[in-house]
Each structure stands twice: as C-alpha cells, then as structure tokens.
Amino acid sequence: MPLSRRRLLRLAGAAGVTGSVAGAALAQDAGGGQYPANQPRRDPPREYEEYTVHRVPEAYDSIQAAVEAAEPRDLVLVGPGVYREAVSVTDTPQLTIRGTDRNEVILDGEFRREDGVLATVDDVVVENMTARNYQRNGFFWSSVTGWRGSYLTAHNNRVYGIYNIDSTHGRYDNCYASGHTDSGFYIGQCKPCYARIEDVRSEHNAIGYSGTNAGGYLTVANSVWRHNKAGVVPNTLDSEADPPQDAARIEGNLVEHNSNDDAPDAAFGYATSGVGISVAGGINNEVFDNEVRGHANYGIAVLPMIDDNLYRPRNNLVRGNTVSESGRVDLALGAPQAGDNRFVDNDAGSSRPGHLTGGLRLLGGDPAVTVTLLEQYLQLENGDAPMGDWQNAPEPPFDELESMPNPERAPREAVRR
Amino acid sequence: MSTVDSLRERARAPFDQRHDAATTALVAGEALVLGLVAGWVVTDFGVRQLATVVVALAAGVLLYGRATPRDILAGGLYMLAALLALFPVAYELHTFTVTGMAGVGSPWTHVLTVSDLLVLVLFLAVAAVPALLAFLVQNWTAVRGRLGP
C-alpha cells in the first residue's frame, strides 16, 4: 500500500496543476451509481443458541490455541493479561474472540509481529480488547462476508489500526484507534460494502478514516475524528481493485483539528493534511450534517485524484454541514472536476470557488485547492513532511474507553443480513 | 514643476484621457479580470471581495491612463503576470497565519522545502506567459523588424 500510494500524484508532481488539466484526457469518469451510499442501521445481530466457551488463560495457554480448538459459533473468551502473539483465524467461520476487559486484555506485537488478529473466514467477530505495537495492523479482516469489530482499541501499530479489505456486510462500533502511519480505520475495495462505522474515535493517525475504492451501502457516522493529519478521506487509487471510489455516506460526525504535524505518516496522509473531510477522486458520495472545525487548510474538500489515471470527483453532495475555523477556507472544490458536485445548506463562512457559499459561479473547481494537495504530496515525497514516530505516538485515553457491557453474554452473529 | 505639481499631474492623467468605446470596454474587461484574479490570489486571507473591488478599480484607473490600446493590453497582461507570480507568495504567507492552530508546528517546516520552491517556479512559469505576451504586444514593431520582412 505505501509504495502504491507513493506513486500517487507523481504525474501531477512532475507537471503541476496545468499538467492535471492536460491529463484530463486520461480521466476515468464513466460508470458508478449502481448502489446508494447509505447503509441504514440493521436490527441487532442474533445470538447463537449453541456454542462452547473457550477460556483463556484458564483452559489454553494462548488465544491462538483456543482459536484452533474452537468450532464455528464458539466464543473464545480472553481474561486480563498481555498476550504476546499474533492471532490468525483462517479455518473457523462465525467465531467470536472477546476480551473480558477492553483495557486489560492486551495483544502485544512487541514491534515485530504482523497483525494482532487476522481473519480470513466469514463472520468472525472480535470484541473488547486492545492490540498494540504490531508491524502491520491491530485488527484485520480480509476477503470475508460478515465481519464485526466492537469495543476494540488499536494503538501504535505500524500501518493501520482496524483494517478491512475486499469484504462485505460488517460493522465497526465503539472502537478507538491511534498512532498509525496510515489510517486508524480503513475499509477498502468493496462495492457494495454493506458496512457501517459508527461511534468510533480516531486520533493521532496519518488519516482518521480511509476508504479506498470503498462504497455502496457504506456509512461512516456519529464518530469523532480528531488530531490526525487528515480526518475522513474516502479516496480512489488504482492500486486497489475497482476504482473509482463510489457512494459512501459520511454523516453526523465530529471532525476537528486534523492538522497534526506530530502524527505518524508513511503513505499519503500528509497530502491531505489540514483537511477535515476530503473526497479524493470519489463519485456519488454524501457528506451530511457533520460538525467540522479547526483545520489548517480546508474543512471539507472535494478533490481530483491522480494515480495511474486521473479521477475527477463527480456528483458528490455536501449538505447540512457546519464548518468553521478553517485556515484557508471552509468548503473547497478542486479542479479539474467532472461536474454535479453540490454544496447545499452548509453553515460555512468561506469557500474556493466562491459560489460554494453563495457567491457568483465563475469556476467549476478551483486549481488553488489542488495546489495544496500537490504541494503537500511533493513535500511528503521529498521527505520534507513533518511527522511523528508511530512507536511513540500518544497512548489512548484508556479511562475514557468503555468496555462492552456483560462480556460473558452469548456470542452473536457479525451483522444481521 | 514642483513635486506636488508632478504628482497632481500624474493623478489627473487617467481622467484627462478620452478613449473610444472599444478601448474603454477593453479597460473595463481587463480591470474586471484583474480584480477577479486578485480576489482569487488572496481568498485564503478572507479578503476576496475587497481585493476584487480595489484591484479592479485601481487597474481600471491605471490602464485608462495609458495612451493606446496596445499599451492598455500590455499593461493588463503585465499586471496579470504579477498577480500570478504573487499567488505562491500569498499561499506560503498564509501558512504563518495558522501556526497557532492545534497540531500545527513551525511554519518554516511547511515553507522552506523543495516542494514550495517547485510551486513557486511553476507559478513563475505560468506568469511568464502573459508577461511574454505583454512584451510582444508592447514591442511588436521592433520584434517584427528583427524577425525580418
């Protein structure tokens, strides 16, 4: 991922803004619109009626040993302790791995193991624990149908906190992620996703939420994204399947102070640093009713993205947001763009171009906005971007992170579908 | 002529000019474009409308005071080049206005980098286009003479 993302905007870096306009010949504007953006709330997941509880450390020396002994629908219930292991779930679908105390059940990668929990089979649920100090991801689902992470804390892992790729039908809720060189929360390469992120908090990462080529029934809602380099970034890249990013809803979030020079970064977080919500090369997205404040560059920006191809944003709707205290302007639409990007009923004081906040429409998109992306990307590419060390990023505010109620309760399916 | 008289003379010069309708329209068009570009350059400072009005009026007065349509066109193009060259300066200057924001470190780490230099060079290159056009417009006779019959 980082290597692919480093290719991002290389063309533009060489040719500048004028090059991006010339590159419009490569624009990939066709398609999209097959699925709506919003994934509504579903009924609560159903409890499994027959299951076995595998207790760690009482009955097993390690979580991995309990996982290997378990059958589908079983519960691996982990007691307090520091577990120095990397857990893989590759044979047992419908498994639940749950800690008895979110802040006391700790998976520790000791800066050398890859992932805290890796799940490659369907309907694996991970709940109520912490993963730290892994070389890759805290919690990771790959190519599955059915997934859920609840009451999880991921901090100081090298790449992503809570990560999911090529998967459908799932949810992150009541989770926290901090100190990652890519994003705290990630959903990638799904169309449609049938997924929700809600009631999570993401801080001190390169990016709070990143969703590469992820859309269709995908909602990011009621969450807090703060003190990252960049806040919420649905984006298009050629390095993952099925671009462009198409149809996500970003709704009801608090997005603030994402201009953090001290946050770690290894991919392209700094390119969109100082922006609360960036729709980067995406189409058919809905950015509704968010509170966005205190960003050094832009509150909400809709931007073109250049990877192997140029992706111009199209048909994105930014509505009902309250945007304030932005360094440059509150609302921004970069050039080139492919049209039908609408900014409606937002409470914002300034914009580029001016018509987004009610001025005269003279430009479709503003090249000055794209210059910001280019300048910061080049700075990152040249190794000049300010950044912190992921291993030393601030620890989470553990006393504010609640454990799940009743961890002894029966395991449940990932999501109702 | 005293200094005061000289300044008075210069200030009155634009209003002593009488151009035909086409030339007046050229002045108005250039002034409008320059005002809008100036507004675009300083949008990040929150003074877009003010800059648009002030620069359009000032440019209009200065251009109207020029003697010929050729001088007016060249003057407008030179002003456009200057505004485009100012964009990266304004862009970087803005960095100093956000240093107090949460998480934002030293402005120098954002300003004194190779990429900032590249942006400056890029806009100087873009600004060179209207500057070159202005030069050609203003010196067309001499240029054509050098190019031969």
Image (tube, coloured by chain):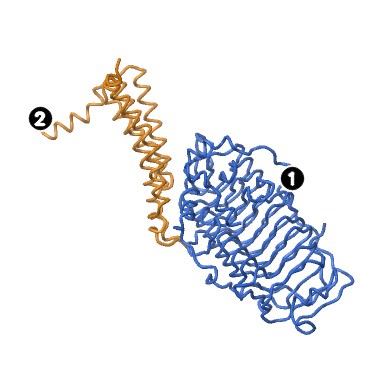
Chain colours: A blue, B orange
In this rendering, does residue B102 appear at all? no
Instruction: Classify mark 2: residues with Cα within 10 Å, few (<14), some (14-19) or many (20+).
Output: few
Describe the element under mark 2 as helix, strand or loop. loop
Q: Which residue is drawn at the image coordinates 54% and 57% (left, top)?
A: A269
Q: Quadrant of residue A55?
A: bottom right
Left or right of B42 in this view: A50: right
- Above or below, B3 against A141 in this view is above
Q: Which residue is drawn at the image coordinates 53% and 64% (left, top)?
A: A264
Q: How far from the left and from the top, in percent, is residue B140?
A: 30, 22
Q: Which residue is mark 1?
A: A35
Chain letter, disc 2 residue: B
Q: How far from the left and from the top, in percent, is residue A49?
A: 89, 70
Q: Which residue is drawn at the image coordinates 32% and 32% (left, top)?
A: B78
Describe the element under mark 1 as helix, strand or loop. loop
Q: How far from the left and from the top, in percent, is residue A295?
A: 50, 56
Chain letter, disc 1 residue: A
Q: Which residue is mark 2?
A: B1
Left or right of A331 in this view: A63: right
Q: Looking at this rendering, what residue extends furthest in the top direction?
A: B149
Label 2 sits on what residue type? Met
Label 1 sits on what residue type? Tyr
